[in-house]
């Protein structure tokens, strides 16, 4: 018993170890009406890609700059106090708290930068923009709506979402490349799906970066390199 009493001061001197639980990745929330509205708005943002074929490079740059000004200054003023516009319905929940539609603005900045970088290659602008609008947009709708098995490297993403990204992004990119260059749709398929696959992988990575940056940045790097491969070249 005396030995036990002798050990008590020693035990009391040992600092308590605080056990901190490592938070697991939160699963994706299921689709809500607001999420669907926001993604439809995101997909509709790709509508101008079908008119790039008819625009001069300088006109395209001016148009994408106008989109940024429209969403930054004009739309918030038009929607201020007018529930009819439902402008904030297209914002993310975190953006409503901050009072700024950062996702929409980043989207606009991305397409503006693309139009400047590839001003001599309109088909590249159309393809990357198309993947961003249709591929990324359908990925979240399918991933949250259909769910299914998650990706092994990112438990917040599903195979259904990444598959939808590749499918819709690849078809759209191929169609836009063929339409913009007056080429054949079938000839553009290999390059379109290669681009969409690489962008889908980048979008699925668990990195703290907005998809509106990740996807166009990846596309801007990958597409010029892919186009140099003879087997993927478009005619």
Image: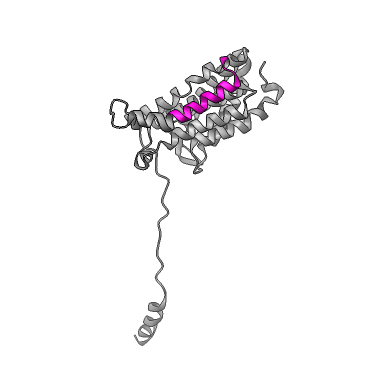
Q: Image check: 185 left or right of 90?
A: right
**Quadrant where the N terminus is found in the figure:** bottom left
Q: Nearer the viewer, residue 174 or 84?
A: 84
Q: Position of residue 34 (x, y in %)?
A: 33, 31
Vertical placement of residue 31 versus 184, above or below: below
Q: Nearer the viewer, residue 201 or 215?
A: 215
Number of callouts: 0
Helix, strand or loop for the magenta stretch, by majority = helix
Q: Image check: 134 left or right of 78?
A: right
Instruction: Give the farthest residue toward the bottom.
Output: 2
Q: Which residues are magenta?
A: 54-70
- The quarter holding residue 10 reads bottom left
Asked if the stretch drawn in magenta spans residue 69, the answer is yes
- The quarter holding residue 146 reads top left
Asked if the stretch drawn in magenta spans residue 160, the answer is no
Q: Position of residue 89 (x, y in %)?
A: 34, 31
**Quadrant where the C terminus is found in the figure:** top right
Q: Image check: 31 left or right of 224?
A: left
- The quarter holding residue 22 reads bottom left
Residue plotted at (58% across, 34% down): 218
Residue plotted at (42% across, 75% down): 14
Residue 121 seen in render: yes
Residue 143 seen in render: no
Residue plotted at (36% across, 31% down): 77
Q: Position of residue 56 (x, y in %)?
A: 59, 18
Q: Position of residue 232 (x, y in %)?
A: 66, 22
Residue plotted at (50% across, 34% down): 212
Q: Image check: 110 left or right of 138?
A: right
Q: Nearer the viewer, residue 127 or 150?
A: 127
Colouring scheme applied when the structure was drawn = one colour
């Amino acid at each position: 018993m005396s030995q036990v009493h002798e050990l008590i001061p020693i035990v009391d001197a040992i600092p308590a170890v605080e056990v901190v639980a490592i938070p697991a990745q939160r699963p994706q929330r299921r689709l809500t009406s607001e999420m669907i509205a926001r993604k439809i708005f995101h997909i509709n943002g790709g509508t101008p890609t079908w008119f790039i074929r008819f625009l001069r490079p300088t006109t395209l740059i001016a148009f994408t700059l106008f989109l940024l000004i429209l969403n930054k200054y004009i739309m918030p003023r038009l929607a201020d106090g007018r529930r009819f516009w439902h402008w904030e319905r297209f914002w993310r929940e975190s953006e409503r708290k901050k009072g700024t539609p950062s996702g929409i603005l980043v989207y606009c900045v991305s397409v503006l930068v693309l139009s400047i970088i590839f001003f001599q290659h309109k088909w590249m602008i159309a393809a990357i923009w198309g993947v961003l609008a249709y591929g990324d947009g359908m990925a979240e709708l399918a991933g949250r709506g259909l769910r299914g098995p998650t990706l092994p490297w990112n438990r917040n993403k599903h195979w259904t979402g990444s598959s939808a990204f590749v499918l819709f992004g690849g078809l759209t990119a191929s169609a836009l490349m063929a339409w913009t260059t007056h080429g054949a749709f079938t000839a553009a398929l290999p390059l379109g799906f290669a681009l969409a696959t690489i962008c889908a992988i980048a979008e699925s990575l668990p990195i703290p970066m907005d998809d509106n940056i990740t996807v166009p940045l990846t596309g801007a790097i990958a597409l010029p390199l892919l186009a140099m491969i003879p087997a993927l070249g478009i005619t």
